Image (cartoon, grey):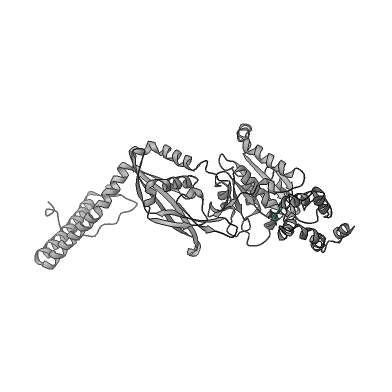
Amino acid sequence: MLDALPRGFSMLPSFPGSGRLTTLPGTVMDTLINLLATTWHDIVTTLHRTLASNELAQGGLLLGALGALAATLRTFPGRLWEAFKNRFTLTLDVQGDDHAFPWLAAWLAAQPVGRHLRHLGVVTRFNEHMGGQNLTLGTDRDGDAVHVRLVPLGGQVLLRYRGHWVLARPSRERRDGQDRKFLGYTHALTFRMFASARNVIPQLLQDAYDFTAGRHDGRVEIHVPEYQGWNLAERRAARPLSSLVYDGDVLQRARGDLAAFLADRAWYAEVGIPYRRGYLLHGPPGNGKSSLVAALAGEFGLGVCILNLATPELSDDRLVALLSNLPRRAVILLEDIDAVFHGRAPRTPSVKLSFNGLLNALDGVAAGEDGRVTFMTTNHLEHLDAALIRPGRADVHVFLGNASRAQVAGMLRRFWPDVTEGVVRELAHRVPDGAVSMAAVQEFLLARRGDFDAVQRDWNAWLVSVHKGCPTKLRLLSA
Ligand SMILES: Nc1ncnc2c1ncn2[C@@H]1O[C@H](COP(=O)(O)OP(=O)(O)OP(=O)(O)O)[C@@H](O)[C@H]1O
């Protein structure tokens, strides 16, 4: 049939316009077809002649064919497995920055087969929920136990869950920023199972959640930003609220307000108000702003996400992502906001965040059902733009000033509960109201821990020394 076609080659006529093949005149079509057929015929004939007369070419072809076959056979099981996986199995992926990750990781580590995971990591700053094997190495200077934990980072195990086979695989990937700067690791968990196991996934999630829920041990989890999510940096023993001494009913009001907010979720939804509350703690340094946040968090079993707004890595977009990605039951703490903006202007060129970006992020959608509790602290209320601290962004303003006499007395009682009330009051009375910070009082008492005579002996000299540069207060003191 091909042989019957005319051979030869002739120049194609040029066609005006955008003529398509179907519009070509019949003779031109014929010429084109003939040309293609002739070329194909020539190729086949040449190949045939070469192979018939050249053993080397024959061998080469055979080797090539065998190579192709071997390659196909080699990849065949993999491709068969891929096809099988796609057809009959399903995958459940959980990324490390997702709230469900610690539940599932802990659940997996607690399964008997979890012990067979072969890629382990050692962590000393860990979340109980990470699961793994806890090792106690000794005690530190304070007598607190020093733990490390072996956590699964890789490998895979096959386990049986509610009558289904599940292949579980923890993994982690290195994350690099610009110029290959190491940013940390991204953790993930993959569960692969037969498609028929789809209906046990909700139960698996429920079991993992139940496994970790209610395990709160009273420690406050401190989170720091990691990329667009949060990383558990530390678990601190919660500070009891009773260990803090504030003036008047400051503490009770702050506690009551937060308690009411946490209990009011349904009401907020009902009246359509975004479920969030902002607290502004202001006053001179060392008077318990950060301590109050930590103590309230411990009291209500909340975590604390500490965010430094001045860091050059914090852009407007990243702040929005971080605020909408808070861990469950965690408050956000923006410390020393006056160090970032003076009015609306950034204090240093390294601050990437814009003032409007901060306002928008604070106004953004509250994170999930948990709502959002924001604490801002500042030593200089007067440096802050009114827009930042208006109700809606900072609903409750709490002033924590220097120690009042009542606070000094309270601190003395904490250190020496057995000292008579008369002595405590007399010592406290010598301190002018608002003249020293609570941190300074604490430091003085700590240095004389267990030696009340030294406290009485050094009290006046100490007051004079902390009042250097404050003549009015000194006069009061010596009066
Ligand atoms: N009202 C208080 N009651 C008991 N201890 C206090 C009080 N205020 C401060 N302290 C003690 O002083 C130290 C410093 O307190 P904290 O860091 O909370 O102060 P701050 O107001 O946040 O300071 P800054 O403004 O410098 O960040 C803490 O160790 C804390 O125990």
Residue 277 placement (x, y as % from top left): 65, 42
Of 187 and 339, nearer the camera is: 187
Vertical position of residue 465 compared to residue 199: above or below = below
Foreground of the two, 74 or 332: 332
Expressed as whole percent of the image width and height from the top left, the position of residue 198 reads 37, 38
The quadrant where residue 64 appears? bottom left
Q: Quick one: 26 or 470, which is closer to the camera? A: 470
Q: Is residue 408 above or below residue 166?
A: below
- Looking at the image, the residue that sits furthest to the left is 53
Q: Position of residue 6 (x, y in %)?
A: 14, 55
Compared across the picture, whether 375 is left or right of 249 comes to left
Q: Quadrant of residue 329?
A: top right
* Residue sitting at the far right: 479
Q: Quadrant of ligand 1?
A: bottom right
Question: In the picture shown, does residue 463 fall above or below 299?
Answer: below
Q: 250 and 381: which one is in front?
A: 250
